[in-house]
Image (cartoon, helix red, strand yellow):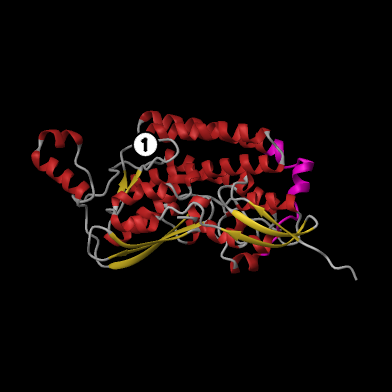
Amino acid sequence: MTESKTITLNMGPHHPATHGVLRLIVELDGETIVKATPHIGYLHRGIEKIAESKLFQQVIPLTDRLDYSAASANNIGYCIAAEKLLGLEVPKRAQYLRVIMAEFARIMGHHLWIGTHALDIGAMTVIFYAFRDREMIMDINEEIAGYRLTPTFFRIGGVAQDTTSEFIKKVRAFVKWFPKAMEGYHTLLTKNKIWTTRTMNIGKISAEEAVNYGLTGPSLRGSGVAYDVRKAFPYSSYEDFDFQIPVGENGDVYDRYLVRMEEFKQSINIISQAIENLPEGPVQTDSPWITNPRTVDVQNDISALIRRFMMHTKGPAAPKGEVYAAVEGAKGELGFYLVGDGTEHPYRLKIRSSCFYLASALPRLLVGHMVADAIAIIGSLDVVLGEIDR
């Protein structure tokens, strides 16, 4: 009997195909992976701890830096948790604008995924088309928020400002254009023989295993589990919109690809409904401690100036208590556990990262596959280390 010898290989943390600073220690028998151990923590920035020294409103820009490829999807989760703790109602118009921005963030996240995922496997053309369309969304972000990648457009109690006619025009133009762009993605990949060979029956995980590992989002739905926070626990008026939850059958890399491709379509459908049925009304809650006075009032009324100063230096105090709010981020369920102690600062913020659970499933998904397949599997999970190393 011949004794097999294995070698240990470090993949990352600087390998571009690990999608950030993820380090994998893989044990190989030839080119077959017999053991894989993920190591995280190379990007740790202490966001949860920093939040304890910030006012509630000041935490919002920190959440942009979690899944930085889909920033607005993080903002909405934190804002909903803070509003739950503070007992605030968000106006309907602001809820619809949040939905539009969150779905654009989902599409942006999927654009980065499909471009880099295809590039990892060897298809170069896709990333140029994906980033062309992603730039259009960043122009929309810039129009309404002033920032492109990390808009920080949401506020506790609503959004920063009302929409503009140019914003609505750009949203409608993108909704009209994007189905044609999706046809291009499908033409390049969906029936491409090289693509299907590299993705079908690779990195399979059953529905039961996916649930047990805590997977959510497209990675869970790719295994056939129709769980989506927007449907299971609707927030920000998602119950007003008609959309489907795409699911796969085999739980492999290819099914996770198909699920995200269908999510492009569903997100555009939601955005179209939201922009065409945008309610009238305010975009901020009616609370003197939360809503900024108008600039014209600040310039002409000393009490408005004082109020604005107090809001930004002291802020509202949250009652003692604890809340949890979850949203459907681009990668899966993103949760915020927030504790108030009667002061103007969060006593504790704990973030439930969907990507952390995705990375924890890598040892199960990689074993038995070749080294080249590891690249396809990691890309299919779409982990973002900014959310893991928070």
In the image, is 361 to the left or to the right of 230?
A: right
Q: Residue at x 39, y 35 (%)?
A: 147
Please give the name of the residue rendered at 9% of the width and 43% of the height, measured from the top-left corner.
303
Q: Residue at x 22, y 49 (%)?
A: 286
**Left of 79 or right of it: where is 271?**
right
Asked if the stretch drawn in magenta spans residue 154, the answer is no
What residue range appears in magenta?
Answer: 186-206
Q: Secondary structure at mark 1?
A: helix
Dot 1: within a 10 Å radius of its alpha carbon, few (fewer than 14), some, or many (20 or more) residues? some
> What is the quadrant of the N terminus in the image?
bottom right
> x%, y% of residue 386?
49, 50
Question: Number of callouts in the render?
Answer: 1
* Residue picked out by circle 1: 145
Which of 89/219 is in front? 219
The residue sitting at the right extreme is 1
The answer to whether any part of residue 226 appears in the image is: no
Amino acid carrying mark 1 in the image = Ala
Q: Compare residues 25 and 294 and report the one nearer the observer.
A: 25
Residue 128 percent across, percent down from the top left: 61, 32
